[in-house]
Amino acid sequence: MERKRKSPWSFMTNGYLLLIMLFIYLPIAYVVVFSFNDSKSMTKFVGFSLRWYEAMLQDRTMLESIRTTVVVAVIATAVSTVVGTITAIGLSKARPLIRAAVLEVNNLPVMNPDIVTAIGMMLLFIVPGVQLSMTTLILAHITFCIPYVILTIMPKLRQLDDNVAEAALDLGANPWQALTKVILPQIYPAILSGALIAFSMSFDDFVISFFTAGVGVNNISMYVYSMKRYNPSVNALSTLIVVVVTIILILVNLIPYIKEKKTKKEEQRL
Amino acid sequence: MKSFFRMTYPYILWIGLFIVAPMIMILLYALTKDGGNRTLIFQFTFDNFSRFFSDPTFMRVLWTSLRIAFLTTVFCILIGYPAALFIANLSERAQTMMVLLLTLPMWINMLLKTYAWRGILMNFDLESEVKVFIGMVYDFLPYMIIQIHTSIAKLDRNLTIAAYDLGANKWKTFLKVTLPLSVPGIISGITLVFLPAVSSFVIPKLLGGGDYVLIGNLIETFFITTGDWNFGSAISLIMALIIIASMWLTKKIDRNAQED
Amino acid sequence: MKKVWAMLLVISLLAVPMMALAADDVLNVYNWGEYIDKQVITNFEKEYKVRVNYDVYDSNETMYTKLMSGASYDVIIPSDYMIERLIREKKLQALDHSIIDNLDNLAEGVRGYQQYDPDNTYSVPYLWQTVGIVYDTTKIDPADMEAQGWNAFLNPDYKGHVYMYDSERDAFMVALKALGYSANTDKAEELNAAYNWLREMDKAVRPSYVTDEVIDAMAAGEKWMALVYSGDAAYILSENEDMGYCTPSQGTNVAVDAMVIPANASNPELANKFIKYILDYENSLMISEEVGYASANAQVLEELSGEGGDYEGNDAYVPRDGYELDEIYHDIPEDLRSQYSSMWIKVKLHE
């Protein structure tokens, strides 16, 4: 099916995508460059230095905030992706009125200013006397992540041909099979996107985290937003994140490739 | 299909507890008198709402926020749609890679990226409004691209090829097949861009040279600095209602478009 | 899909080795972000064989809201007016002066501003500062600046070259002081006059309303003048020699950030030890050197501003003290805060 067209058109489309990527990575590159700046300034580069990396390594609060951020984001993403997917599929078969009502409520965390969600959640926990902790933080993150997953999956489900699932049921498949063999494969790109968006939302949240996390629980954003004065160590920290994620991306992409080559070689040997 | 609907029960319970219950508290604050020091007292009043509408300043702030969010959304669609379309035409592996590449920058703190933009844009003599939109579009564009891409990935190819085979040209295929299919994705994209954009204020504040007082800023001021949760709640509810109304309009237009 | 899960798995595995080691005794400290030398914390942990949880906030008000959730901290470092409120609401506990036996270290200057807690019953000053104007001496003559004081914000010659700090309380302080009133006034006519003064300012100089980004911007010399805290000014002056600092003769706000122990602290004994530790000469020195705000420790203040000190010749480091027109903020009631907020929004909207 792969059509290889090396036309001016594909040159243009690739050029456009390249421009978008440049736009998106420009500030990231800026942050990386300024993580090596020998000054506190974010506007003037005075010289190369590793001082912010040293400072970062000595800053335990900051290092621990990475752990909290990742743990919270992974758990929140896992739970919200599963719950969001199940709910979205269920909703797509629900009566329009119920669907509309649930989706409207679902939109609230997306629409409300963070401070409103934050105070609402904090009240929810403190009124019955629940101590804020890592758990409350994770619950809050799951709550604002699920809507993003549902919003990402719903449009894909709308495109799905209802008849396919029903045909599967008619042909004797049980609902579980219809779900896993018919529906899920078709919406899987949407689930993937939903999970990625949920992860990013959780990773970058400040206000809600601030008011739902317990004593001694800090994520990266809480650290960054509370800086009375700009500390370029966060540039170093971000550079570290970029590097780690890039390495993982390369590995994850290379491993199947190497495996493929290996199996091909083995096949050839046979 | 009853068995499928049952799948939504856990989430309905969840939103009842974690979204509806907190919103009821916010509603109670909005509808009651200021008890002082953020305490809730059950003396019902509409004062918080009338205070908002009696002072044109507040409406002005809300209007500016809506305008910025609206334009940000429009720019995101205009720039993001072609990108999503072009990505959907890549090989499957390249598509996954592109989606990952689009999300990776979202893991770098927004404040940090905005500071970076401040540094970059300082070298250019631009209107502060232009800077604000660069920052806003930057922040929200990935969501729009991913949403639209998700809706046209996979399905699109077979259909467009079929349309080709039936003799439709590229442009016609796009108008008759791809575009209508992507409408739900656009709507999702609008939801993910417009809704949060209305109440966001950090980017305009940092890039706009302090020229922007926005509704999110106002709400945060009343919740945090002033400590008047009653008025803060009322403002956020008014904002929510206006957004819901405008989204409802968007969906209506979508439905009409689909019926065409 | 597999790729994403594999990626997430690898990331979570990477996070595991960073799991914190448990220590027997824990001290929960809550402070402004970037307001300490981290080494001091590490040293304290080593010396007392404890673990310090160090959380941060960005304003007195966010801290206060967080406290409402019942969060239990052992040491917090709020500002004067917030301490006044916390004392009134009985949210603090008395310090143990038998542990904190080095109160004599406190500088005379900062002692004079402790109206919220004159005998250090609940609080021990940490760092202190004034509010003033940082200006580019190549653009504005120092003599002119001193002569104008706050009225420089009304000078149309500076139009487009001014940063105003986006904090309603500080902005109103400037106006009230320029008009010769108290920064803690609750008289409606004085507030109205201040409001009109600020509107006039907005028209005359069209300032950019900024927050902490002003520090970087003034260090880079982006505008001619800005309203800043002296501690930040000290940093700006050390980065850019063209910059000068003026504490207007009409009087200004002096702010004291002080260490307190909340009533619900779980480890008050260790908290008292921590406060004593911070007030010690060496630790105060490290903190003030790193942060640039004036130390509450007399010896440190003298040394850093004296010959060979980090801030020798830096006009912004040592706050003016004993000046009759200078005052600290007092806690103001909510309806007054609400008025401030509404009026400040109108100023910023050029109404």
Image (spheres, coloured by chain):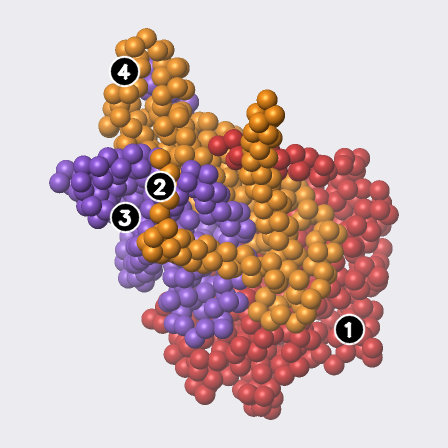
| Marked residue chain, label 1 | C
Cα gap from disc 2 to disc 1, whole angstroms: 68 Å
- Chain identifier matching the purple colour in the rendered picture: B
Cα gap from disc 1 to disc 3, whole angstroms: 55 Å
Q: Residue under label 4, please give it.
A: A167
Pointers 3 and 4 within a single chain:
no
Using the image, determine if residue C203 lies above or below residue B84. Answer: below
- Give the structural element (helix, strand or loop) at label 1: loop
Cα gap from disc 4 to disc 1, whole angstroms: 79 Å
Pointers 4 and 1 within a single chain:
no
Q: Estimate how packed mark 1 is, as few (under 14), some (14 to 19) or many (20 or more) residues with alpha carbons within 10 Å.
A: some
Using the image, determine if residue C219 lies above or below residue B162. Answer: below
Pointers 1 and 3 within a single chain:
no
Q: Residue under label 1, please give it.
A: C310
The residue positioned 60% from the left and 86% from the top of the image is C137
The residue positioned 59% from the left and 22% from the top of the image is A270
| Marked residue chain, label 2 | A
Cα gap from disc 3 to disc 4, whole angstroms: 42 Å
- Give the structural element (helix, strand or loop) at label 4: helix
Q: Residue under label 3, please give it.
A: B242
Which labelled disc corresponds to residue A3?
Answer: 2
- Give the structural element (helix, strand or loop) at label 2: loop
Of the residues shown, which amino acid type is indicated by label 1?
Asp
Q: Estimate how packed mark 4 is, as few (under 14), some (14 to 19) or many (20 or more) residues with alpha carbons within 10 Å.
A: few
Of the residues shown, which amino acid type is indicated by label 3?
Ile
Is residue C245 at least partly visible in the picture?
yes
Percent of width and height locating residue A208? 50, 43
- Does B225 sit left or right of C275 as displayed? left
Residues under numbered marks 4 and 1 in contact, where contact means CB atoms less than 8 Å apart: no
Q: How many marks?
A: 4
Camera-side mark, 2 or 4: 2
